[in-house]
Image (cartoon, rainbow, N blue to C red):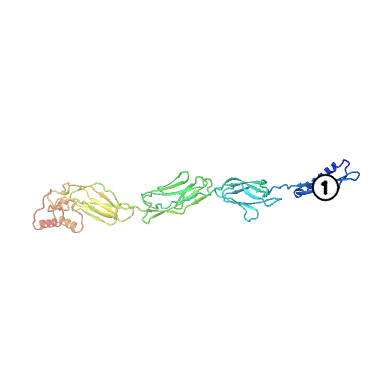
Amino acid sequence: MSKPSDLIPVPSPFGPTLPRILALLCVLLVLFAGGTRAAGEYPVTFDATDDSLAVDSEELQITVHNDNQPPELSPLSNVTVDELTTVSFPVSATDSDGPPPTLSSSTLPGSATFDDLDDDGIYTFEWITTYDDSGSYNVTFYATDANFPADVDSAEVIITVNDVNRTPWLLIPVNQLDSVMELDTIQFEVLAWDDDGSIPDITLEVNGTGGMLPNMTFELTWDGTFQNGLLTFIPNLSQGDDKPTFVFMKFYVFDEFDVNLRDSSSTQTIFVYNRNQSPEIDPVSPQTVAAGQLFQFAIYATDPDEDSTTFTAENMPPAATFVDNGDGTGGFEWIPNPSDTGLHTPWFLASDGSLTDTLVVEITVQYSGCCIGFRGNVDYDVGDAIDISDLVYLVDFMFNAGPAPPCFVEADMDASGSIDISDLVYLVDYMFNFGPAPSACP
C-alpha cells in the first residue's frame, strides 16, 4: 500500500480545490483501512498544477488516535449439579490491544472461591457444595480493560444445585437403665431427626423379630425437631430369671419419603431379673371332728419359682402333731379328747427361705358321747365288753402303729385326757390284778 506522501498529483479541471479534497479522501480511506494499526501522526502534502504548469503546495498534519478495543470473556455455560458435588470451571479473557484484563465476579455463593491459582491470568471458580446449598445461584463474571476501566465485558452463569435427600439420624441416649425386675417398669428412649426437615419413622425389632413382647409398648412423639421413641416394658412373673433373661432390641429409622434411606442402632439389651414369689398353700376347708376320734389331713404347697419349701406349724391343739415331709407336703394328726371340745385354729406356714405363705385351718371338736357306761371298750365292740381284745387293740395302737381307738374316751382308762402307758397299765391291772374298775364315761 502506498503511503499518503507517495500520491501522484492529479491535475484538476475544477481548479486547485477539488484535487486537494480528493487527496484528503484518499488519505482517510487508507487510514480507515488500516484499522487500529493506523493510529499515529501522518504529514500530507497537497500539490496543485494548472495548464501553465504552475504549482501550488500545501502540507497538512493528520493525527489518528487509537480506538480502544474492550476485553472479551471466554464463553461460559450454565451448570447443574447435585448437592455434595464440586463445581469447577475456568474463566479467562483477552484484550486485543492491551495487557491482560482484570477478572472479578459478583458475590459468590456458599464457600465458593474465584482465584488465579497458577498466576497465568486464567481464573478458576470452585465450589464444594454441601447439603445446605440446594437452589439456583446467578454469578456474574467481569473482565475489565487494564488501561480503560470503563471498558468491561461480563457474562452471567446460572448454577443450579439439586437437593439430595439425606438419611435420617438415630440416637440412643447414654446412661439409660438396662435392667428390671419382674412387675417393675423400665423405659428406654431413642431419638431421630432428618436434616432435610422431614419427619422420620422409628421401628423396633425385639429378639430378632418385628413384634414386641407381652407387656411392652413403643410410642412415637414428634416435637417439631425430634422424633421421640419411648419403649415401656413391665415384665410379668414369667419373663424374668435369676440368670437373668436377656431382651435384645434393635431400632431402625426410615426417611419419610424414601424407605430405602434408613439407619439402625446397635443391639441394645435389657436384663430381666426374677422376682421371688411366695409359696402358695392349697386351701383346706373348715373341719369338724368328734372327740375321741383320730383326725388327719394333709397340706400341700407349691412354689412358682420351684424353690424348695419348708413347713412349720403354730398354735397347735394339745397333743396334735405335724410332720413336714420335705417335698412340699405335710401331715396333721390329732385325737382330740372331750376336753378339747370347741374351735381350734392351728397355723401352717410354708417358706422358701425368704417369703412365707400362711394357712389357718378351722377345726371344731364335738363330743358325741361315744363312750357308753364305763371306759375300757377300746375296740368299741357291740357288746361293750372289756376283754383281752381291748388290751390287744390298745397295745397294737401304742406300739405297732395300729389303728386308733374308735372312741378316744373308751381308751383313756384313767381319764387323764390322753392315751398313754398309764392307760395300758390301768387296763392290765384291772383285768389281771383285781385293780380298780374303769372310770365312768363322762
Residue at the right extreme, as displayed: 52
Residue 182 percent location from the top left of the image: 36, 51
Q: Is mark 1 on a helix, strand or loop?
A: strand
For the residue pair 356 and 363, the one nearer the viewer reads as 356
For the residue pair 230 and 293, the one nearer the viewer reads as 230
* Residue for badge 1: 45
Q: Residues within 10 Å of mark 1 (few under 14, many from 20)?
A: some
Residue 386 percent location from the top left of the image: 13, 53
Residue 221 percent location from the top left of the image: 45, 44
Tell me the amino acid under the disc marked 1: Thr
Residue at the bottom extreme, as displayed: 399
Image side of residue 206 versus residue 257, left or right: left
For the residue pair 159 and 366, the one nearer the viewer reads as 159
Image side of residue 62 versus residue 178, left or right: right
Image side of residue 342 versus residue 47, left or right: left
The mark tally for this picture is 1
Image side of residue 171 versus residue 96, left or right: left
For the residue pair 32 and 208, the one nearer the viewer reads as 32
Question: Which residue corresponds to the image point at 44% horizontal and 47% vertical from the top-left?
Answer: 229
Residue 249 percent location from the top left of the image: 44, 52
